Image: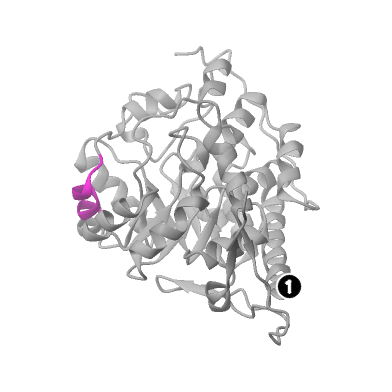
Amino acid sequence: MADEQIIRYDAPTVEQEIEIVSTYRLENQAREVIPKGGFDYISGGSGDEFTLRQNNDAWSHKGILPSVLADVENPDTSTSILGHDIKVPFIMAPIAAHGLAHATKEAGTAKGISEFNGTIMSISAYSGASFVEIEKGLKGNPRWFQIYMSKDDEMNKNILNEAKVDGATAIILTADATVSGNREKDMLNKFVYPFGMPIVSRYLTGSGKNMSLNNIYAQSKQKINPEDIKFLSDYSGLPVFVKGIQTPEDAVLAIGAGAAGIWVSNHGGRQLDGAPGSFDTLTEISKAVSGRVPIVFDSGIRRGEHIFKALASGADIVAVGRPVLYGLALGGWKGVKSVLNYFESDLKRVMQLAGTQTIEDIKKARLFDIKK
């Protein structure tokens, strides 16, 4: 374990609105202000980063067929999921350790989401902030809770109890991260978390501070199976999403075990390198789900076109991850709000040009295969 006296992590502290031309450009801007170890952790993938690249390349495999005589004006981006009416079809993905991007940690992200006023925050069990700290920023806005399960179910019950008291309306079981992916940048940087993890510290040997991701994952549950879905659903009484689904077979298995939602994701290219781009798996999974439960999609969302293509391929909503953290780094909660505003306006632009008035219209829109 590293010496706590030696480790110093100077996260950004600025709070300002940011001008966004493209969220791809935000990554390079954030590189300039986030300490190297933290930036590589946030931005990097596993192994050769093949899957990380595929998440971006997959968007070029399908195009949008516009309808130009569709009588569209001022597109409506509102939708609903599991009883929540939200003004946009995107939410905050569960990402660990927002404090790597900004000193305000998840509380800063939460305030940006609250000020945007119209979406859902997914709170990671590996948050560097407590539920109480996050709520100060979130101010009663809806939240889902993502769990990395303990090997001890009594611990899991305690965490679920706390999440429910905090107001979580759904549980997200991340099933694709039973061990850490081969994150070579983290190993080269000898990266350890510069702060603790209040939610899961109860089952860690240590608080999480100065611990590597490998060490933390090793103390979490490795054997994930359908019974875990049933346990989480039965004990919490809340709908359970299974996150990390990449095949139709796993989607069917999860629904059979009681999943109330499927979350199509490859963990942003951070787990199994060599897996396909997340978007390339979505259509077949959607066909297998066949509308029985809602589908959330993540991994690689950077433009309004990406949101559109995901919804047209079977997703009900998408989740945005890294761009929000880059916005947090560059502008604190105001930067988070700027990113969310960007996605809202960019999606409206795409909807207008594609001839779609509503989110339901997007779901009926036609995409075409792009020949290589």
Residue beneath disc 1: 353
Query: In terms of secondary structure, what is the magenta stretch mainly?
Result: helix
**Is 42 situated above or below 351?**
above
Residue appearing at x 69%, y 70% in the figure: 348
Q: Quadrant of residue 81?
A: bottom left
Q: Closest to the observer: 322 or 195?
A: 322
Binning the other alpha carbons within 10 Å of mark 1 as few (below 14), some (14 to 19) or many (20 upward) gives some
Total count of labels: 1
Residue appearing at x 72%, y 75% in the figure: 352
Residue appearing at x 20%, y 55% in the figure: 230
* Quadrant containing the N terminus in the rendered view: top left
Q: Closest to the observer: 127 or 104?
A: 127
**Element on which disc 1 rests:** helix
- Percent from the top left, x then y, of residue 5? 56, 14
Mark 1: amino acid = Leu
**Is 252 situated above or below 175?**
below
Residue farthest along the bottom direction in this orientation? 71
301 in the magenta segment: no
Q: Quadrant of residue 362?
A: bottom right
Residue farthest along the front direction in this orientation? 371
Asked whether residue 167 appears in the rendered view, the answer is no
Q: Closest to the observer: 210 or 75?
A: 75
Left/right placement of residue 40 relative to residue 198 reads right
> What segment carries the magenta color?
224-232
